[in-house]
Amino acid sequence: MSYRDLIGDWDRAVRAIDRRDWLSARDCLSSVAEPNSRIYFNLGCVRLHLGDLPGALKAFDLTIAKDERLAVCFFQRGIVHLRLNMFDEAEGDFRHALTNLRGHSVIDYTQLGLRHRLYSWEVLYNMAAVYSRLGQWAKAQQALTEAVCLKVPGSNAKLDSALSKVKCRNTFELVDVPEGIVFRPSKHEVDELKLKDFLGTSKVSPNPDSVIMKVHYEYTVATRVEPGTSYTDLLNIIKSKLGHQSGRMQLSYKDEEKQELAPIRGEADLEKMWNQIVERHITVWCKSADPLAGRQVLYKTLALYNYSGQGPEDMEFNEGDVIDVLSEVNEEWLEGHSNGNIGIFPRCFVGPQKLETTDSKKPSCSEVTNCTQTGASRKVYFVEGCRE
């Protein structure tokens, strides 16, 4: 199954969910040949809504097999186990969810495509629901008391009601992820589907005079170039636009089929790039051929998730990439290098372990509040492992 087909089926399923057409969403998600963890999670949520508890359990099992750090999936699977009266399994799932919260009071999954926050008090609340069904009232009261200490505005009434029921030795209902809250493919990925030329015709207009080329560097510029410009001339045009007349530079373009950056090393690569022109627009990425010149690597770490930059100063990477950490901007953001690119990224997208540590002394962190850049306050996204 091609990447485009996967994104297409995923998007169609999400739109069916938005229409509350649960059967169509289930069929669309089930037809994906090689689902990722987020698609399996969506399938589990749809089957849970349809009352297919064994099917939901299987889908959540497959989700966790692909991503064992996804706390929200342990949370949802715990709900399924509880409804199947598998109380020990439900308790275990909620404990795993707490473990993957890593001591934080909330996980915001927005950056991963799930418009939802999972709170630690909700996990403790559901654990108390398990204990109440087992008749373990002291444990239920203790879990709810811990949840009260972590409460957020709006949760007081629910927690107070549950505590009252436990004191009277009555059970209470669970909290779960709201209906229709599922992982969505990124807007960029969906927009790319609209650019697909299904007839196989050239994307380059016949004999265009020029195209607008957007160049992503440390900042973004745009210039007009003629398709067919030689590699040497194109380099000179870009250097002139950027004000860099000396130094080696590496150009890349986005391969639409593979959905990844492909280097431009000469005329053959350049010819492939020209075929990516859509409506007289093309984008290239430009970087120094030696981006680490004069920079010191503090340590290496591993990307836990894909990260799509929120601004031109951000560094994009994929899950599994090894990242050179160059500086610690603040408690939430790091500056690093990966695949020839340098930029900032959220600390919580990479593993807490250091793959390699240098003996050099770390520089002091910049005093940056909410990752303020160029005078404008940046919105910071937090996912698993991040502070609230």
Image (cartoon, rainbow, N blue to C red):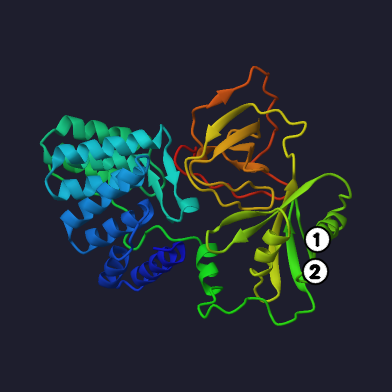
How many numbered marks are there?
2
The three-letter code of the residue at mark 2 reads Val
Which residue is disc 2 drawn over? Answer: 225
State the residue in front, 59 or 346: 59
Q: Residue at x 70, y 33 (%)?
A: 367
Residue 227, how many percent across, how many down? Answer: 75, 71
Q: Hey, which residue is sitting farthest bottom in the picture?
A: 206
Residue 241, how many percent across, how many down? Answer: 85, 58
Res. 328 mark? none
State the residue in front, 69 or 294: 294
Residue 270, how many percent across, how many down? Answer: 70, 62
Is disc 1 placed on a helix, strand or loop? Answer: helix
State the residue in front, 210 or 103: 210
18 horizontally vs 298: left or right: left
Which residue is disc 1 drawn over? Answer: 234
Give the Cα separation between the discs numbered 2 and 1.
8 Å
94 horizontally vs 15: left or right: left
Q: Residue at x 74, y 59 (%)?
A: 215
Q: In this picture, is 28 found above or below 106? A: below
